Amino acid sequence: MAFYSPEKPDVIFDEDGDVLLTVGDQSEKRNFLIRSSLLRQHSSYFDDVLKVQSHDSKNPWRRSYKRADVLALFIILRGLHSNIWPKQVGLRLLVRLVGATWRFNFDRELPDGSAPLRTAAWGWLFSIRERLGLSDMVRRWTLMKAAYFFGNLAAFNRLSLELVRGHIGLFANLENAQAAILGLGVDFPTPMKVTPDSLILGKSDLP
């Protein structure tokens, strides 16, 4: 089992892994050794970049991602490799997981139609939702967008319906309040943040 700790800079998911990912900046750098087959199975991004690369366990493919979220990517890789997922996450960590999911396109289903990350996200989304007050529409707005990025259509539809029925006022007000509850600056780059219409007409960071 792979463990993550400040004293352990190298995280080995597979002893015979053929991909070495160096993630994070100098203050929190980790080397993740993992099999390319697992990355390609779950991520269209890694499928694209690895299918033209020559690599094996003796000469792994190496890539550095200095601005990637170390903890979020570790949680996703550990879950996909060992099926060990946190039962609950806080809202801020959920948004970090969304960012890693979006950046590396962990969007692929297994041949049987299942998607382990999407299944884990369902539990995270609704464990947070169950703790919300009836009037807490800002966090519901955040959860709805997270459900979109995780590809969880059922959760997205349910949260959207709750927002339509329960929110009085402009949805833009929910977007403006989101950064404050997450502790993010106004210009903090995240796929969860919709670009104002005043900056780019009718478009947003959501694909």
Image (cartoon, rainbow, N blue to C red):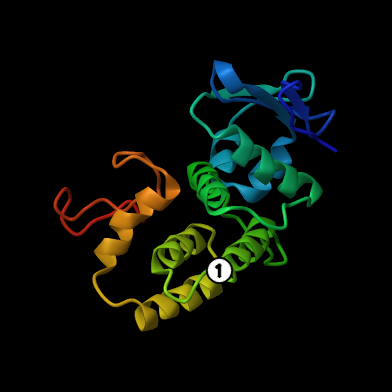
Residue 115 visible here = yes
| 160 over 207 or under it: above or below | below
Report how many numbered discs are placed on residues in the image: 1
Drawn side of residue 201 relative to residue 166, left or right: left
| 73 over 203 or under it: above or below | above
> Are there few (<14), some (14-19), or many (20+) residues within 10 Å of tag 1?
some
Which quadrant of the structure image shows residue 50? top right
Which quadrant of the structure image shows residue 127? bottom right
Where is residue 76 drawn, in percent x and y? 66, 45
* Position of the C terminus by quadrant: bottom left
* Position of the N terminus by quadrant: top right
Please tell me whether mark 1 sits on a helix, a strand or a loop. helix
Drawn side of residue 136 relative to residue 39, left or right: left
Q: Residue furthest bottom?
A: 165
Drawn side of residue 39 relative to residue 97, left or right: right
Residue 192 visible here = no
Where is residue 33 drawn, in percent x and y? 74, 28
Where is residue 63 drawn, in percent x and y? 58, 23
Where is residue 110 drawn, in percent x and y? 69, 59
Drawn side of residue 82 relative to residue 63, left or right: right
| Residue at point 16%, 48% (across, down) | 199
> To which residue does mark 1 refer?
129
Q: Residue furthest top?
A: 26
| Residue at point 23%, 56% (across, down) | 203
Which residue type does callout 1 highlight? Arg
| 42 over 134 or under it: above or below | above
| Residue at point 45%, 67% (across, down) | 140
- Looking at the picture, tell me which residue is in the foreground, 122 or 51: 122
